[in-house]
Image (cartoon, rainbow, N blue to C red):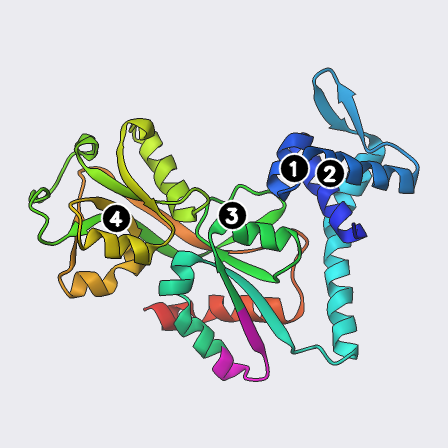
Amino acid sequence: MDFDFRLKVFYVAAHTLNFTKAASKLFISQPAVSKNIQEIENSIGTALFERLGNRLALTPAGKILYHHAQIILEQYNLATYQINEIIGKENGNLLLGISTTISQYVIAKMLVAFNQHFPQNEIKVIQANSKRVEQLLIKNEIHLGITEGLPDNRSLKFIPYIKDEIVLVTRCNNTICNEDKYVLNDIYKLALVFREAGSGTRDIIDRKLKEAGVSIQHLHTEITLSSSESIKRYLKYSHAAAFLSIHAIQEELKNGELKIIEFDNFSIERYFYITHLVGGLTGLPIKFMNFIQQHKGKIYS
């Protein structure tokens, strides 16, 4: 593997002090983490980790490398960008990984605005759930991500972008849900539709329900679907309810196709995140990130 990837493996392993957790964060196997660490140790001629009982600790050399790893990664990114400038790729393609809800309902206006300001750049968007976007970033297959998941991967930096609310909805003529407000325990009486595992929306819903004392395994999950669009279509013919981003249901609320089921003293709020590898950004990716942050008030107001 490339040196920059091996250094990322070391950086995450040094963060977690646990090769199994590092493997999970990097979406590789635990033996692959060990192999990459060993290759760095062989290269520099000394150990980077030591075992203290049942836990790992950084050696003096490991502490030095950990301290400088972020700078090294940032300088590597800068060097790559400057080389691209020399060979005529200073504009080129911007590869974005955007999680499903954001891609379908949030980011289109911002992409149009950016292209109008910087027409010399070509943007390519990969739509995937938040976990998949993180995988693509780790593998250097995209430059930047915009995700809706929980910011818990230490090899990535998560910058809050815009606020979102997740609400429980059902079709307007669903006679099972006629009350103005419900208590949260009423959720056990409902048939529910959920997003697939790995979805950022699913992750935050599960966490918030558990924090509120709801037993996830005792909920009545009628079906699991892979997108907000498929969930909305399903709800049109079902008595079920589903948690969806408020951004995903604006048209259906306006047209009277869906209605929100409100709970006393319970809500789910979150941020969408701009996501990139630890070590900083240079060139076109940082230009795009700065642009969407500076103009979000105009686009989303």
Q: Nearer the viewer, residue 160 or 1?
A: 1
Tag shown at residue 23: 1
Residue placed at 57% from the left, 43% from the top?
Answer: 153
The reply to whether callout 4 and callout 3 are in contact (CB within 8 Å) is: no
Label 2 or label 4, whichever lies nearer to me, is 2
Residue type at mark 3: give it.
Lys
Label 3 to label 2: alpha-carbon separation: 20 Å
Whichever of labels 3 and 2 marks the residue nearer the N terminus, that label is 2
Tag shown at residue 32: 2
- Magenta segment boundaries in residue numbering: 115-124
Whichever of labels 4 and 3 marks the residue nearer the N terminus, that label is 3
Q: Nearer the viewer, residue 172 or 275?
A: 172
The reply to whether callout 2 and callout 1 are in contact (CB within 8 Å) is: yes
Label 4 to label 1: alpha-carbon separation: 34 Å
Determine whether the residue tagged by mark 1 lies in a helix, strand or loop. Answer: helix
Whichever of labels 2 and 4 marks the residue nearer the N terminus, that label is 2
Residue 177, how many percent across, how many down? 10, 43
The quadrant holding residue 76 is bottom right
**Furthest residue in direction right, as rendered:** 45
Residue placed at 65% from the left, 62% from the top?
Answer: 281
Label 2 to label 1: alpha-carbon separation: 8 Å
Determine whether the residue tagged by mark 3 lies in a helix, strand or loop. Answer: helix
Tag shown at residue 167: 4
Determine whether the residue tagged by mark 2 lies in a helix, strand or loop. Answer: helix
Residue 54, how many percent across, how many down? 70, 17
The quadrant holding residue 73 is bottom right
Label 4 to label 3: alpha-carbon separation: 22 Å
62 falls in the magenta region: no
Residue type at mark 1: give it.
Ala
Tag shown at residue 82: none
Tag shown at residue 131: 3
